[in-house]
Structure formats: C-alpha cells, structure tokens
Image (spheres, rainbow, N blue to C red):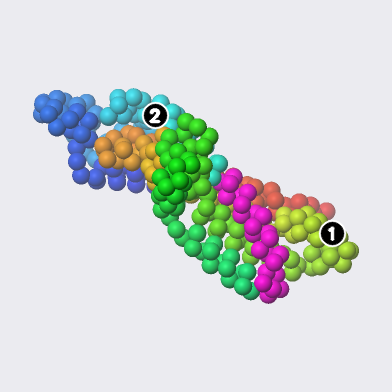
Amino acid sequence: MWVLVTASFLMIHLIPGDPVRAALGPTAPAALVAAKREEMGLDDPILVQYWHYLQDLFTGDLGTSIVSQLPVSEIVSQRLPATLQLALLAFLVAVAVAVPVGVLMGVLTRRGHGRRTELAFTTSSVVLGIVPDFLIGVGLVYVFGVSLGWLPVAGNDTPSAYVLPVLSLAIGPAAILSRIIRVEMVTVLEADFVRTARAKRLPARTVYLKHALPNALTASLTLGGLILGSMVAGTILVENVFAWPGLGSTIVSSILNKDYQVVQAIVIVYGAAVLIVNTLVDVALALLDPRSMIRED
C-alpha cells in the first residue's frame, strides 16, 4: 500500500499541466490562481507535499476535490457501490459459466478423448481470454445496442443496463477460469480416490460433483481471487465505454483535470480492494487445505 500510495502521488504530480488553472478556467486571474496554489500547498517542494499528504492520509482525510470542491471521501462513497456491483456481478457470471463448462470439458476430454473438442475449446477460450474487455464491450454495444437496439448502452438506471457491461467484464475471465478448471478436472479424474469411487459403482454424477469437483477447485480458487481483484481494477475502461457512474469513469475524468486528491484516493481504493481479495483467498485456501485438518496425536 505504501508503494502504491507513493507511486500514485508521484505519477499524478508528473503529469504536465496546472490543476488549479484547469479547475478555475483559462480566464481566471493569475493572482487568483497563485493564491489558490498557495492555499493548497502546491508551491511547496514535492517532498513537503508528499509528507503532508501522508499525514492527512493517516488521519483519514482524503482531501477535497479541486474541481467540484466536494470532500473526496464523499465522492468515493457515492461512486464505489456502482463499481463493486459491476465487478461482483461480472465475477458471479464468470464463475457460473466457467465451472460447468470447465467440468464438462474435463469429463469429455479426459484420457486423451475428444481431441477435436479439446482443440476447439482451447482455441476459443484463448481467443476470448486475450481480447481486452473494453474491446468486447465495444463489440457488444455495436451488436446489441446500436444494430439490434435490444439493450441500453449507458448508465445503470434499469436492470437491462447491467447486461452489456457485466458481459464485457465476465467473458474473458470466464474463458480463462474454465480452462484452468478443465485442466484440474482432468488431473483429478485420474487420481486414486476417483478410481476407488468408480470401483464402488457410484453414480457418475456423484463421482464428478461430490468427489472430483471440490478437489479440482483449489487451484481455481486462487485464480478466481486474482480475477476478482483484476475485475475491480478492470472496471475503469469498461465504465468509460458504458458511461457507468462508478470509480472508473471518475478516475479518468479526474486524471484529465489533474484532480490530485480524487485520483490518489481512487488508486488507494483499487489497491486496497486487490489486497483484501488476495488476503481472503489466502485465508480460504489455508482453511480448505486438507492438511490443516490433520491433528497430530
């Protein structure tokens, strides 16, 4: 978090332009601009500004927006729910698609069977996984919003407005996650405990869902946590494609206006979200590790 805070502070200050002039307008008197810069401490050396920023940060003061004159904490609290809704819905959709598809492909392609099916699945999942989410969003807007007119392409006022941005974020991660689940499923299906379950003549549904699937999801859980963290940060471009009223569209406009405090606060929020998700995944993996259940006598 310290590295993230420091990097964001330095990068926003290295962007050319005067934030005070951008906020007050090109016709503002030079004396007013100078007075505002002095009030905000922008005339101080960069290290002094950095020290004051850290002091305010540790006291919970995120500052005030140069453009809107609103407290940054208020701006973040207003925009954060929309970003979290988008990221969490996309993650749930990705998991809901990836798990059954990955399990099905694992069953169909185990022991070298279904070579053509494996090739088609691998090729399509690779292509979908490497296409940027904002590019998928643009394509969805053109097809379902502009050409067919079935779905809205901006805002989040109606449930239908969630469809295209959620799909834009979910398609790539779903493809990547389904590949990992397929590989894990193929490996688990060759394990001894699965052979034992088959030898007991258990139904195939029980073998796949009760015995194989839980063991195949361990590695997928790690990747799923990374995907969720990347989805939160990945909303930046998608939000701008769909004019989504979240942190992503806010940070882009704030960068253009050199609104220091807002940009730095949003970067901290994104970084904290990724760190929290990764920590929760590590805890979940430790709890799900069968070795943690072993008690020595």
Question: Which residues make up the magenta segment?
Answer: 91-114
Q: Residue at x 62, y 73 (%)?
A: 116
Judge left or right: residue 277 versus residue 101: left
* Residue occupied by mark 1: 203
Q: Position of residue 176 (x, y in %)?
A: 55, 58
Q: Position of residue 262 (x, y in %)?
A: 34, 34
Q: Residue at x 87, y 67 (%)?
A: 199
**Closer-to-camera residue (295/147):** 147
Judge left or right: residue 218 versus residue 24: right
Tell me, yes or no, if residue 131 can be seen here.
yes
Q: Amino acid at mark 1?
A: Pro
Query: Could you say whether the residue bearing mark 2 is in a helix, strand or loop?
Result: helix
Q: Which mark is residue 75?
A: 2
Crowding at mark 2 (Cα within 10 Å: few <14, some 14-19, many 20+):
some
Query: Could you say whether the residue bearing mark 1 is in a helix, strand or loop?
Result: loop
Q: Position of residue 214 (x, y in %)?
A: 72, 54
Total residue callouts = 2
Question: Tag 2 or tag 1, which sits nearer the N-term?
Answer: 2
Mark 1 or 2, which is nearer the eye? Answer: 1
Q: Residue at x 48, y 40 (%)?
A: 151
**Closer-to-camera residue (239/180):** 239
Q: Main SS of the magenta segment?
A: helix
Q: Amino acid at mark 2?
A: Ile
Determine the image quadrant of residue 62: top left
Q: Residue at x 53, y 34 (%)?
A: 159
Give the distance between the C-alpha atoms of the residues marked 1 and 2, in whole angstroms: 55 Å
Residue lying farthest left?
Answer: 30
Residue lying farthest front?
Answer: 148
Magenta-drawn stretch contains 94? yes
**Quadrant of the drawing holding the N terminus:** top left
